[in-house]
Image: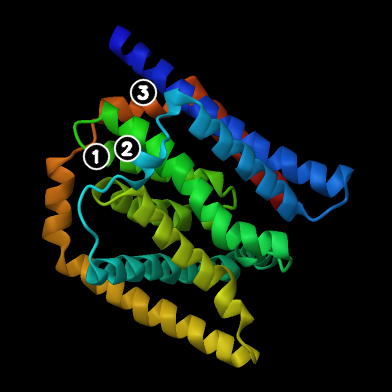
Amino acid sequence: MKQVQGLRLKFTVIGSLLLAYFVLLYLAVFLCERVFCIDIGWGYLGAAAITLLILFRWSWTGCTLAQFCKREKPMRGSAFLLFCCLLLTCQFFFQITSWIALSVSGDVASNMIHQATSSGNTLPMFIYVWVIAPVVEEVVFRGLAQGKLIDYGKGKCFGILCSALIFGLFHVNPIQIPFAFFIGLVLGYVAAEYSVLWAVALHLVNNFVFGGLIGMLKPAWLEQLVYFALTWGGGLFGIWILVKNRKRLIGYWKCKPVEWSNFAAFITSPGIMLLSIVVMVSMFLIML
């Protein structure tokens, strides 16, 4: 019992830090939009700068440039392309779930999909989505959260699973949460087995291609053609990769298992529960 309470306290500290990051982001956006009447991109950039400054200056977080760049094993070009295909598989399933949601709830789903896929068309938002967000999110979720959580499991799967779950919740949008969760699993594996730096590189590719590059293609039919070709071609190839390597994936899970008692302590810790409540309230508000 004391061990569980001790774990909950440690998880609460992590959850509280993540909650502070969440509140900082939305407070910065609120101030830019409602008080200063400037582009919300400046709010995101400011919040990201403050977050990185605190994480790299506060020694407890363990966020150092050396830890950020530490390599577990080398990344080959073929492996990097494989992980890119897995990200495309996540995009493929996002597209499928979006179609299903549209057929069920119409306008509500349409608004959520627009919020999930719209990254803004201003310079500050471009800089944030294409460059800064991949860096700060990987430092926060894979460097800080996953780096701390891995210590509380028998293997790396506990940290990967928990950080991916939080990463999904942070996206707030109900349609985007499952997509972000699976993206988090891929990036978490890359961070654990290669380095956080390689997770940043993959995140950059994902945001740059789908957050801006494809949307810049003209005319509209070319944009749609490239999008469908990438999501369906790369996505199906990614599924084939997963099926082909299913025994290796199952073996990885068994060799580095999740301790479910620790996972229960994680999701029931006050910090994580409070973070979940704040996210759910935010989710309800964006659906109004």
> Of the residues shown, which amino acid type is indicated by label 2?
Gly
State whether residue 234 is above or below residue 172.
below
115 to 197, vertically: above or below: below
The span from disc 2 to disc 3 (Cα, nearest Å) is 13 Å
Side (left or right) of 86 relative to 212: left
Residue 1, above or below 85: above
Of callouts 2 and 3, which one flags the residue occurring earlier in the amino acid sequence?
2
Count neighbours of disc 1 (C-alpha within 10 A) and say few if under 14, some if 14 to 19, many if 20 or more.
Answer: many
Q: CA distance from mark 2 to mark 1?
A: 6 Å
| Disc 2: which residue | 159
Q: Which mark is residue 265?
A: 3
Q: Amino acid at mark 3?
A: Ala
Circle 2: element type: helix
Type of the residue with mark 1: Lys
Q: Secondary structure at mark 3?
A: helix
Question: Sequence-wise, which precedes: disc 3 or disc 1?
Answer: 1
Image x and y of residue 221, in percent: 60, 92
Please state if 22 lies on the left or on the right of 11 as rendered: right
**Residue 238 x %, y %:** 29, 71
Colour mapping used in the image: rainbow
Q: Is residue 277 visible to us here?
A: no
Mark 2 touches mark 3? (CB < 8 Å): no
